[in-house]
Amino acid sequence: MTYLHEYKILDNNIKVEYVFSTVADKIKVIDMWVDDKPHSVNWMGPEARTRLMTRLEDDFTNRMCGTTNDEPYDHSIDTVDPDEPTDLPGVTVTDGFETTEEDEEMFDTMIDLDRDVPTEDEWLEEKVLTSMGV
């Protein structure tokens, strides 16, 4: 059984027919079209080919897990440009990583030196107890 994955990059409509090979244990592209004109994976650069295969693996996983819908998914919205302000509620972009307000509440990265770092006496006592097997 083959699958058809459709997506859009800039103004180009891309359709990829693919299959999962149980012999090779990977996805193989059967046919590809860009704006209804035949295209080949061999014509793509290595980075573009890697991105395409990642898209197809994600599409295949979504189909097998039942998390896909009937509409073509626009993958161009998957990444948030750290240089652009985002209008997504509760999302902050820091150094290219997305964090939500819930993440910030869940993880406190502040270190209380008086509480978290043992004194020399506490450290020595722990070391003695550990060596004694207590």
Image: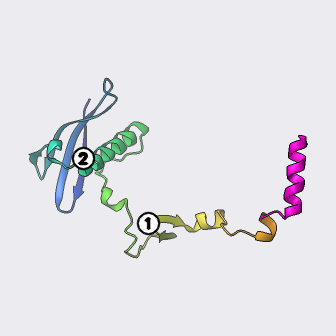
Q: Is residue 128 magenta?
A: yes
Q: How many C-alpha atoms fall within 10 Å of the one at disc 2: few (<14), some, or many (≥20)?
A: some
Quarter residue 23 falls in: top left
Q: Position of residue 39 (x, y in %)?
A: 12, 45
In the drawing, does residue 52 fall left or right of residue 12?
right
**Which segment did they paint magenta?**
117-134
Residue 99, compared with residue 43, is above or below; it is below
C-alpha separation, residue under disc 1 versus residue under disc 2: 23 Å
Residue 17, position in %: x, y?
21, 39
Q: Which residue is mark 2?
A: 49
Q: Is residue 15 left or right of residue 99?
A: left
Q: Position of residue 12 (x, y in %)?
A: 16, 57
Residue 50, placed above or below residue 120: above
Location of residue 107 (image quadrant)? bottom right
Q: Looking at the picture, does residue 72 appear above or below residue 20?
A: below
Magenta span has 122? yes
User: Looking at this view, is 107 or 100 the one in front?
Assistant: 107
Question: Label for residue 96?
Answer: 1
- Which amino acid is tagged 2? Arg
Taking depth in this image into account, of 69 and 115 the one nearest to the observer is 115
Quarter that holds the N terminus:
top left
